[in-house]
Amino acid sequence: MEIPKRNDPSDFKDEDFEDYYARFPTELDHIPQDVVKNWMWYHNEQVVEFSKLYNFKKWNFELRDFDNNEVMTIKHFDYDLKLLDGKGQEFLKGLLNEHEAAKFMFENGTSPCPIIVAKDASKHIHHIRNEGNFMLEPYQLIEGNRRLAYLRAMIRKSYPKLKASHNVWVVTIGE
């Protein structure tokens, strides 16, 4: 089942989340509202395309607390992880303060909303790298590139305000 497109009133204004969520398919009501807002609505054009790859009816979501060691077990493809780690260094130097997530994380030592990871999903193709690039284990990053980059940098450098744990949506994909 495909994720619905936002009905943006113009190129300069997004459809209000409440309106979008009101017409979100009832067949997908197991997807937490937080996930719909921060992934499917916010990154709508991308997720509409990704929904052709995935059967979201088989995705189960569990909100968990990851300690800092668990955060560091979250995988992404080598190329992407190198980019993320570079962004993390820029974040620590204060070069990304225009981003709301960066401001929040500097102050609070954790993410403003949970990142999304897939657990033990190596039988499934990852939406970013497509054909032939299966997800990595134990946890593959699905959504939250920037937030993961900032967390990894804070963990590596023992950032003073770093929290001991962070909320993460863990997805298991049914067969």
Image: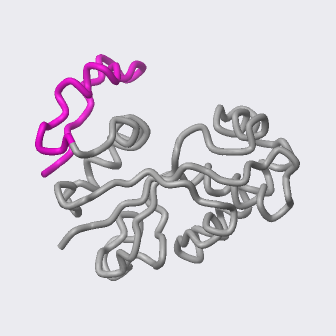
Image coordinates for residue 72, horizontal then vertical, percent: 65, 69
Up/down of 123 relative to 83, above or below: below
Q: Left or right of 93: which side holds 61?
A: left
The quadrant where residue 14 appears: top left
User: Is residue 12 one of those drawn in magenta?
Assistant: yes
Image coordinates for residue 129, horizontal then vertical, percent: 40, 70
- Helix, strand or loop: magenta stretch: loop
Which residue appears at 19% of the width and 61% of the height?
A: 58
Which residue appears at 81% of the width and 43% of the height?
A: 95
The quadrant where residue 69 appears: bottom right
Quadrant position of the C terminus in the picture: bottom left
Up/down of 81 relative to 24, above or below: below
Q: Left or right of 93: which side holds 83?
A: left
Image coordinates for residue 5, horizontal then vertical, percent: 23, 36
User: Is residue 33 one of those drawn in magenta?
Assistant: no
Which residue appears at 34% of the width and 54% of the height?
A: 61
Towards the viewer: 113 or 135? 113
Q: Left or right of 122: which side holds 1?
A: left
Q: How many marks?
A: 0
Q: How are the residues colored?
A: one colour
Towards the viewer: 154 or 62? 62
Image coordinates for residue 103, horizontal then vertical, percent: 73, 33
Residues drawn in magenta: 1-29
Up/down of 73 relative to 66, above or below: below
Which residue appears at 77% of the width and 60% of the height?
A: 155
Q: Left or right of 88: which side holds 116?
A: left
